[in-house]
Amino acid sequence: MSRLLVWIVPFVAIAGCSGAGSGLRLEFKPPKGEKRTYHTDMELRLDLASGGRQTIRVGFDSEDEVIEAGRDSITIRTTFQKVTVKAAGLTEMLAPQFKAIEGTSVTQVFDRMGRLIRTEGDSQGPTQSLQGALTPEFGDVPLHKGAKWTAKIDAGGQQAFVTYQVEGYEKVNGKEAVVLTMEVSGDSSLKAVSPPQIWVEVATGRMVRSIGTLSIQVHGASAEAAFKVEQVR
């Protein structure tokens, strides 16, 4: 069961603007010292090999602080707070793994295209996976409606590809955001049940909202992860 968690968590919080010009390109450029708080709600549904389905619900806050904003890289420290877990039956054995992230922090370094360069901290725990999913990798393409680009990702040791597509622009928290959809390919065990949508703030490249459902099969067991991540302040 814990191995299944390691596979699904990297995609949970992913797991990620109105009227912008067709020549606009995204760049990850939050200013040093900026702090943002996100709330994540997740429902993990496990289909057991013996039959039946078990569900665990998790909610938590995470505070991001930009501790360095260099010419070529951005360093962000994320602290996890207020973790709530509702589990019953076999999923109760997963509850301690989620509760364990409360009060922990992880530091990650990204380049200006949103690519993860390295992680400092609990690189083996769920903190790395949850924070890494908050930053979509950008493509060097103009952001007109229908524009696409593909990024290669490491999904718990498996190689997969994420294709982003521009769906349009909206205002979120009074700021311009581009709306992206995400399709996963390259590995038959990972599928987008409800293709995730990601709202990205144009001015900074920061994710401000993400929602969707993904499924995965590992060693005969399958799981669906429905998630919603939103910036709350």
Image: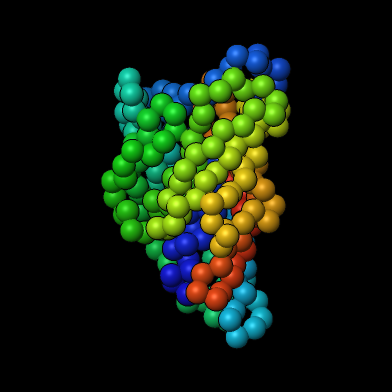
Q: Relative to 122, does residue 87 appear above or below in the rendering?
A: below
* Percent position of residue 34, x then y: 42, 28
* Percent position of residue 183, x then y: 62, 45
Observer-nearest residue: 190 or 38? 190
What residue appears at the point 29 percent right and 50 percent down from the top-left corner?
121
* Percent position of residue 119, x then y: 32, 45
The quadrant holding residue 66 is top left
For the C terminus, which image quadrant? top right
Observer-nearest residue: 25 or 127? 25
What residue appears at the point 65 percent right and 14 percent down from the top-left corner?
21
The quadrant holding residue 47 is bottom right
Please state the total of marks drawn on the protein image: 0
The quadrant holding residue 49 is bottom right
Q: Is residue 62 in view?
A: no
* Percent position of residue 214, x then y: 62, 56
Q: Is residue 164 in view?
A: yes
What residue appears at the point 43 percent right and 50 percent down from the top-left corner?
154
In the rendered view, does 144 fall on the left or right side of 160?
A: right
Observer-nearest residue: 47 or 186? 186
Q: Residue furthest bottom?
A: 50
In the rendered view, does 198 fall on the left or right side of 8?
A: right
Q: Residue furthest left?
A: 120
According to the image, what is the colour scheme of the structure? rainbow
What residue appears at the point 40 percent right and 63 percent down from the top-left corner?
100
